[in-house]
Every structure is written in structure tokens, then in C-alpha cells.
Image: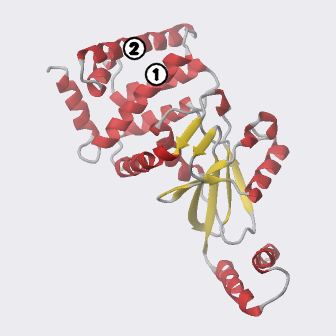
Amino acid sequence: MVEVLDSLATKYQKLYGFEFNEQKFLPLYEDMIKHVYSKDRELCVISPLENFELSGVSSLSINDYRIRKLTDWEMEQLIGIGYQLDTPFSPAFGEIETLYCIERIIRVPKRSTPPLEPFMKEFMTALRLFKNGATGYAVLLSYSRIWKSGWGATFHRRRKFDVGPKYILSKEETSSFIDHFRQFIRAKDEFSNNIKFSLRWFNKSYEEHEILDRILDLAIAIEVLYNSSDRLDLYVPHFLESSKEKRMELSGNIKKLRKLRGAIVHSGSCGVDTEFLNMIESIFRLSMQKLLKLLPETNYETILKDIRASLLE
């Protein structure tokens, strides 16, 4: 209660200064009473986006989510946590320069807080499926939206995202991204187990430290997505391309991927360059983008049947 009263006094002072006015104070007091006696509360959950930039716009709101800059108060909490716990977010790693975050307001029981990561997972997945860029987050910060009477944090340990290309979402791309995200939300209820599992491996590739681990994750993601391993060099080109020349080129790249995967599994090493890795990531991304467009009108099994049938044409 002391924390709530302290928040009440601080909020009044910021809005109206030090001079007391009962008419101005009463609405704030009534909000505090509702907060104290309510069975649930609105929680603000934020995940700082590392290696990310929103270009040409200050913020972007989509459904329950918002991309915006971190506030000074949020930065203070995160810096403090970084120094105390020596997490990957600490200034020693250079990632404190990140100013943008994903925000989501959720309603939760007052006496318990559910796992927070699922609330951000779908947005982060959609962000990565939209375009290339090594973005992610190391920590989730949560606090009461109206009365900052307490806050908490959960940590997500993984590789540094600044080793990859920066994710820049420009003003010109925001409209397309909004359409893409809403398409993702509409289609997600139709996701088969194969799609869900392939997205798990796709996201895992962003967590890896080594390029071999990333290419292996992406190879598994593509195999699971197409529900095939031995005919990928036929399925992927026929799903993504229409011209014979482009299908042959894509088929060659898939065959190369299978050889690299075999070399990693059997010998523990192989030569993989970043350009090839990015191309394989793009193949998965393009496959998922096309699936998202098809799923509201059909289902995963029908799409696979159509791919197999296209081989006979």
C-alpha cells in the first residue's frame, strides 16, 4: 500500500505540481481505489528490440502491440538490472544503445503473473518473417500500467544480435508490415503442427552463436515445413517459382543445403558462408509468406497435395 500511495503522490506531482487541489486529486484517488480493490490489473509488458530501428515514424501500433522508444524510466530499470545481474543486456555488450521496444498491455490476476514470453512470441515471429534482419530481445520488463507500484523482469539468454544485419523498418514499409501481421494473425489458427514446429526452428536460428548451428536449424525448419527431406529439391522450387530456369537454380541451392546438412551431421563441420545462409533463410521466409496468403482459403494438407500435383505438370 505504501508503494501505491507513493505512486499516487508522484503522479499528482508530475501532473499538477506541489500545490494541492482537491478537485484534481479526487479522480486520481478514485483510480487508485479501483486499482487496489480490483481482482486483476493491466500489465505493461515490453521487450527491448536489439539491432532494430524504426525509420521515418516515431511509433507503430498494430492490434494489441506497439513499437515505440523506451521511456527514461524503463531505461533506468533495464540499466539497473544489467549491472546487477550481468545479463547480455548490460552496457558492456553495447546493446544498451537500443531504444526501441515492443509493448503489449495485458490484463492479468493481481496476485499472479503468467509467463510473459508467449505474449511477445507471435509478434517477434511475424517481424522476422516480414524481412531480413537480426533482431531479438534479451529481457522482458513488466509493470502495472496505471500504478507503477512494482515491476519484474525475465531474461532470455542468446547470441548478440548485432553480429547480423540491422533490422530497419521504414515508414514506407509500415503499411505492408501491418497487412503482413494481420495476415499472420488470421492464419495462425490454421497452422498445422508442421508449421508450428518449423517456426520454432526458424526462431531458434536467431538464437544461435555459430553459423553451422543456424544453417542446421534452417535446414530442419524447411524440411518440417514441406514435410519432406528427400524431395525438397522438387517441392520448394515448384511452390515458389514458375519459370524453369528459376526452379532449376533453386533446386541446386536446396541440393547444396542437403549436402551441407549431411556434412554437419556426419563430420561436425562444413564450409558455409553468410551469403548462402541468408539465401536459405530467405527461402524459408518466402515459403511462409506464401503459406500465409493461402491458408485462410485452404489448409496445409491441401497445399502439400497441390505441390505434389504440380510436379506432374
Tell me the kind of residue under disc 2: Asn
What residue is shown at x 73% (from left), y 38% (from top)? 95
Residue positioned 64% across, 64% down in the render: 112
Query: Looking at the picture, how far across and down is residue 111, in whole percent?
Result: 66, 68
Q: Quadrant of the N terminus?
A: bottom right
Query: Can the viewer see residue 21 in this picture?
Result: yes
Tags 1 and 2 in contact by the CB under 8 Å rule? yes
Placement of the C terminus among the 4 image quadrants: top left
Between 58 and 265, the one nearer to me in the picture = 58
Around disc 2, counting alpha carbons within 10 Å, would you say few (fewer than 14), some (14 to 19), or many (20 or more)? some
Is residue 44 shown above or below 293? Answer: below
- Identity, as a three-letter code, of the amino acid under mark 1: Met
Residue 40's spot in the image, x, y percent? 60, 72
The Cα–Cα distance between marks 1 and 2, rounded to whole angstroms, is 9 Å
Q: In the rendered image, is residue 230 in sight?
A: no
Q: Quick one: label 1 or label 2, which is nearer the N terminus?
A: 2
Q: Position of residue 153 (x, y in %)?
A: 71, 52
Residue 253, numbered circle:
2
Report the residue marked by disc 1: 279
| 60 relative position to 192: left or right | right
Colour mode of the rendering: secondary structure
**Left or right side of 61 for 141:** right
Which structural element holds mark 2? helix
Q: Is residue 36 left or right of residue 66?
A: right
Which residue sits at x=69%, y=47%? 99
Vertical arrangement, residue 254 with respect to residue 56, above or below: above
**Which residue is farthest left?**
313
